Amino acid sequence: MDENNTQDNQSNDVQDPPKNLLGKIKHLGPGIIIAGSIVGSGELIATTLVGAKAGFILMWLIIVGCVIKVFAQVEFGRHTMIWSKTPLKALDDIPGPRFKVKWILWYWLAMMMLISTQQGGILGGIGQALTMVKPLSTEAEVYNKQVSDKISYTVKSAMSPETVESEEVAVESGDVTEVPEVTAERPHDVKTYAIIVAILTSIMLYFGRFGLVQWFSTIMVFGFTIVTFVNLIMLQSDPQWAVTFADIVSGLKFSLSDGEGINMTSVAVALSAFGLIGVGASELIMYPYWCLEKGYAKFTGVRDNTPEWLARAKGWIEVMKMDAWASMFVYTFSTLAFYLMGATILHRVGLVPEDGDLIATLGEMYVPVFGQWAQTVFVVGAISVLYSTFFVAAAGNARVLADGLGLFGFIPNDEKSRMEWSRKFCGIWPLAALGLYLFFSSPVAMVLWSGIAQSLMLPMVGFAALYFRYKRTMDELKPGRVWDAFLWLSVAGMFVVGFWTAYSKLFG
């Protein structure tokens, strides 16, 4: 499809923006898709891991990590709506050296390779969860039982004596019995389930469209978030697990110390998670693609600087901003709930999720509230939220990858080819993630390495957001000074995390 045809199609699709709140709500959608890709590896795995290692002291960093990047997200969306240009094509225009494409796209290509490993890690987590719900072999049943016994022992040994006795744990002279050992081999059921899920997802995404992705992500994210929130509230009835006012205050002190010095391991995990929680570098780039598919740019129409066009642009940018902020509230709420669960239970009993037992360990967060059937409650929710991330991120990354490979010259660089290859990559991406998981088989490490890669790209994305704001935004559509101040603060945070991550990996 050539540029003239694209402009003709956009002219035919021009719509005036909604004037009332209900009309704007009806046009939301890209943000909830992004939330669906976020609430999974970042929240369930990385954020809970931070809470398990650091306790409450880094809660402020988690909140900042969710909120701070929205300003850059909106600038990416604003640029796309003004120029009807995909984010990667926009990044190919920013200042800097060019070798076939601009420098920033070369790093993006490397980051995408690590993001595919993240997807493999999530797929492994789904496989673990399904194996716990429905083992396919006797070996898996034995392994699940041994892992559950070991984790339960750790939790109960940290409880008060009254709680231990009520849970019927053997106690002799004030000490619980020996730690149960896991002697069984890790079952192959996990990989079997991973293969099945990857193939089914590949088929669904190849034939699916925007509406399917939007509704699927909405249902999956909200379901599990509600379960986690209810669990957190119910914990307040037990002093052993309740989140106190002092805990909240300690988490909002903007400090890296728990009173006994700075735990650099916890900080390192938190900053790695910073690249995943909220809108990561990949979601910042991915978001405008969903805005394009939702129709914000074509509703605005081809830029002609007429008063009518400016009015439409202002209106649809306001809808896009509402969409971005609405999604921010959703994933910040979810992120904070997962973090508090990790800090409240896992940190207090000294449980840190391990690669092979990730889901089983996280499932123990639900035992104090729901009892011994908590594993099932959690696992069903974990399958929902992890699969939502796997499904939505695969769909989004396929669209970005098709655009990027066109710029690199691997496929034709036109709109029709981009859409055709987006569909093909929707089928290929889940299978590629499966291959990486089968090779590495380390879900936690695979997720965190992606977080590091995205953290390193945050300063580049922040620079691009400033370039879009000051060099590519029309005077009539520029935001106010307060917005600019927060945008600079957002970019400053991205630079701090990016450079700290680079320094720690090179010299730490």
Image (tube, helix red, strand yellow):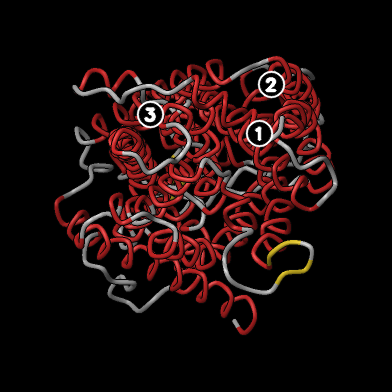
Left or right, 351 with respect to 347, comes to right
Q: How far is the residue under mark 2 from the one under mark 1?
A: 8 Å
Element on which disc 2 rests? helix
- For the N terminus, which image quadrant? top right
Q: Tag 1: Cα neighbours inside 10 Å, few (<14), some, or many (≥20)?
A: many
**Residue at left 80%, top 38%?**
432
Residue 31 in view (yes/no): yes
The kind of residue on which mark 2 rests is: Leu
Q: Earlier in the sequence, mark 3 or mark 2?
A: 2
Q: Earlier in the sequence, mark 2 or mark 1?
A: 2
* Foreground disc of the pair 3, 2: 2
- Above or below, 31 relative to 75: above
Element on which disc 3 rests? helix
Q: Which residue is most to the left?
A: 245
The kind of residue on which mark 1 rests is: Ala
The residue carrying mark 2 is 205
Check if mark 2's residue and mark 1's residue have beta carbons within 8 Å.
yes
Q: Position of residue 190 (x, y in %)?
A: 75, 30
**Residue at left 71%, top 15%?**
207
Nearer to us in this view, 469 or 67 = 469
Q: How far is the residue under mark 3 from the one under mark 1?
A: 21 Å
**Residue at left 55%, top 72%?**
501
The residue carrying mark 3 is 225
* Foreground disc of the pair 3, 1: 1
Q: Position of residue 467 (x, y in %)?
A: 46, 65
- Above or below, 105 relative to 48: below
Residue 23: which quarter of the image?
top left
Nearer to us in this view, 300 or 185 = 300
The residue carrying mark 1 is 394
Nearer to us in this view, 51 or 100 = 100
